Image: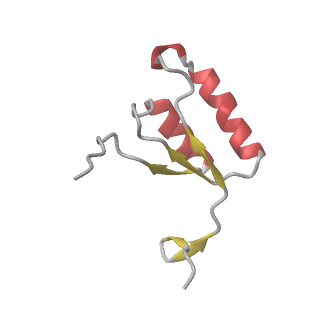
């Protein structure tokens, strides 16, 4: 069986991108910059992004915009990788 994403038992064709922080310093990213980036996502017909968990969790604005625009967020966790 092929890999398939389901939301509420409905198959979803995921179209999206890998998201890395817009800036290394979160305080420099304005709400307007987030809106512009999310407008670009919706213009490209994306419906999902993978939020890279290598350093930060995004701002509330990020998650609110994703929710409002119907963008699913596959959130990585900021846990260190340990090799045993």
In the image, taking residue 62 as reference, residue 76 lies left or right, namely left
68 vs 13, nearest the viewer: 13
Residue 15 at x, y percent in the picture: 67, 58
Residue at the farthest bottom position = 1
In the image, taking residue 50 as reference, residue 47 lies left or right, namely right
Residue 11 at x, y percent in the picture: 58, 75
Determine the image quadrant of residue 41: top right
Where 45 falls versus 61 (above or below)? below
Where 68 falls versus 11 (above or below)? above
**Applied colour scheme:** secondary structure
Where 25 falls versus 50 (above or below)? above
Residue 18 at x, y percent in the picture: 58, 45
Residue at the farthest top position = 28
Where 16 falls versus 66 (above or below)? below
- For the N terminus, the quadrant is bottom right
Q: Residue at x 77, y 47 (%)?
A: 44
Q: Residue at x 41, y 47 (%)?
A: 76
55 vs 71, nearest the viewer: 55
11 vs 1, nearest the viewer: 1
Q: Residue at x 49, y 20 (%)?
A: 24
């Amino acid at each position: 069986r092929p890999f398939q994403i389901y939301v509420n038992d409905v198959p979803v064709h995921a179209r999206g991108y890998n998201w890395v922080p817009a800036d290394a310093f979160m305080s420099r990213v304005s709400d307007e910059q987030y809106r512009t980036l999310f407008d670009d996502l919706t213009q490209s017909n994306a419906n999902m992004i993978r939020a890279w968990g290598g350093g930060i969790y995004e701002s509330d604005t990020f998650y609110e915009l994703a929710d409002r625009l119907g963008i699913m967020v596959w959130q990585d966790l900021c846990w260190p990788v340990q090799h045993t």
